[in-house]
Image (spheres, rainbow, N blue to C red):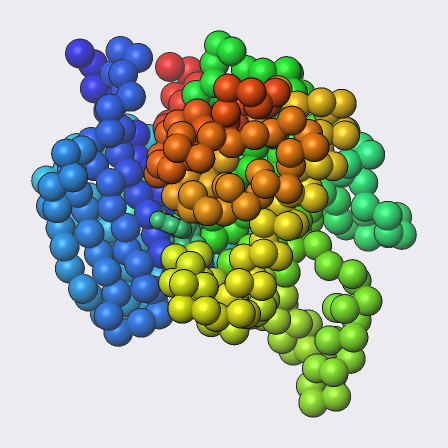
Amino acid sequence: MSSLPILVLNSGSSSIKFSAYETGDGQRTRLFEGAVDGIGTDLGKFWIKDAAGKKLVDQTPPLPSRAVAFQLVADALHSGDFPAPAAIGHRTVCGGPNIRENQIITPALIDEIEGYADLAPLHTPIAVYIMREALRLFPGIPNFAVLDTYFHRTLPEVATHMPIPTEYVAMGVRRYGYHGISYESILHQLQPNVPEKLVVAHLGNGSSISAIRKGDCIDTSMGLTPTGGIISGSRTGDIDPGVLIFILKQIARSTPDAAAAAEKLETVVSKKSGLLGVSERSNDMRDLREAIQAGNAKARLAVDKFCWTIARWIGSYVAELNGLDMLVFTGGIGENDIAARAEICANLGALGIVLDPARNNVRGEATISAANSSVTVRVLPPLEDLIIVNHVLRLMGQ
Ligand code: AMP
């Protein structure tokens, strides 16, 4: 078998995840996966495990900076214990208005993506840093940007165009949509029987929903940034713009510098809101479920708001699709929070969605709708790395 190991890099605001796949002769076999987590702390985590789950690296190093974190990854991958990659695929949340296609990474491309860092401020700064470092530390190996926004290229203008003055539209303000690689992976798993009218709910620390007709995305909940759409772990989701103006005016009283005030507003809407803001406890659904068990009313309200918002969104997408054949839950909450799926679907009976409680009582891949449900409801994992590998191979002409 010919060997073509592909390395996938997926960086978040405080972590770098990576995995490698053996891809020779049509195979997609995961060789290993790992992560450095806790960037900016004294007690980070660095681990690598093989395909069988055996830990090959398990460390708790100080991670004062992303430079230290990525150097650990590069040193491990250069140690000779792992096959040298033939190419590297970078999960790229947003490339801005001009970069809409997955493509090879050049210094000029990195500059262009960096120019639109404000569109995904939690993701782009570390992603462009890792791109530059990967070009430096893995010389001669092609690197490719695989975009979350690519899947949403089929959105109609009525969905992408924002109701704001044209001067801002010209600056690239529009609905981009995110989690696109996850959505692509759901379609990949449904092949060859992709239903005509499909809604996918990617519910994780960041959450979004998409309406998909005949495999094409026609609407998606996240907008200009991943802060839009449904309520997420620490992000507001869509909100009356008057709320932002009100908060900004409060901030401006103690922060007259406009740029500093904007930063503070961004922290409020991206890091202090959502499930965390409502519960005043955690952005993590597992913590909230524990708190609810203990009778915590704010945690209950946060989760109720989460499920209520999602049900409303699904309802509007059913109107857009003019019906619904299948609803898919994915992401950490979508796959694992049995109660959230039940609570969301309990509000959707009028659409013919009926869950089977016994079938729903699972974590991971399953069909969870009842026999009398007019809509099939499924749970599928987001196989994002696999999709990135597929794009890299396509771009390499393999
Ligand atoms: P993700 O961003 O896709 O990794 O998803 C993270 C979210 O999934 C967090 O809110 C977790 O609390 C949630 N999650 C993971 N496992 C479970 C579980 N067993 N029950 C409820 N929520 C979970």
Quarter of the image with the C terminus is: top left
Q: Where is residue 224 in the image (x, y as percent from the top left)?
A: 69, 49
Q: Which residue is drawn at 17% across and 11% down?
A: 1
**Figure check: 176 above or below 73:** above
Say whether residue 64 is visible.
Answer: yes
Q: Where is residue 304 in the image (x, y as percent from the top left)?
A: 58, 56
Q: Where is residue 356 in the image (x, y as percent from the top left)?
A: 47, 30
Q: Nearer the viewer, residue 143 or 165?
A: 165
**Figure check: 290 above or below 184:** below
Q: Where is residue 138 in the image (x, y as percent from the top left)?
A: 29, 42
Quadrant in the picture for residue 290: bottom left
Q: In this view, does 107 lie to the left or right of 169?
A: left
Q: Residue at x 50, y 26 (%)?
A: 369
**Figure check: 271 above or below 258:** above
Q: Nearer the viewer, residue 380 or 3?
A: 380
Residue that extends furthest to the right in the rendered view of this protein: 165
Q: Residue at x 62, y 45 (%)?
A: 310
Q: In this view, does 322 lie to the left or right of 343?
A: right
Q: Which of 50 and 323 is in front in this view?
A: 323
Quadrant in the picture for residue 249: bottom right
Q: Residue at x 70, y 54 (%)?
A: 238
Say whether residue 103 is visible.
Answer: no
Quadrant in the picture for residue 388: top left
Numbered-mark total: 0
**Figure check: 170 above or below 198:** below
Q: Which of 81 and 56 is in front in this view?
A: 56
Residue that extends furthest to the bottom in the rendered view of this protein: 254
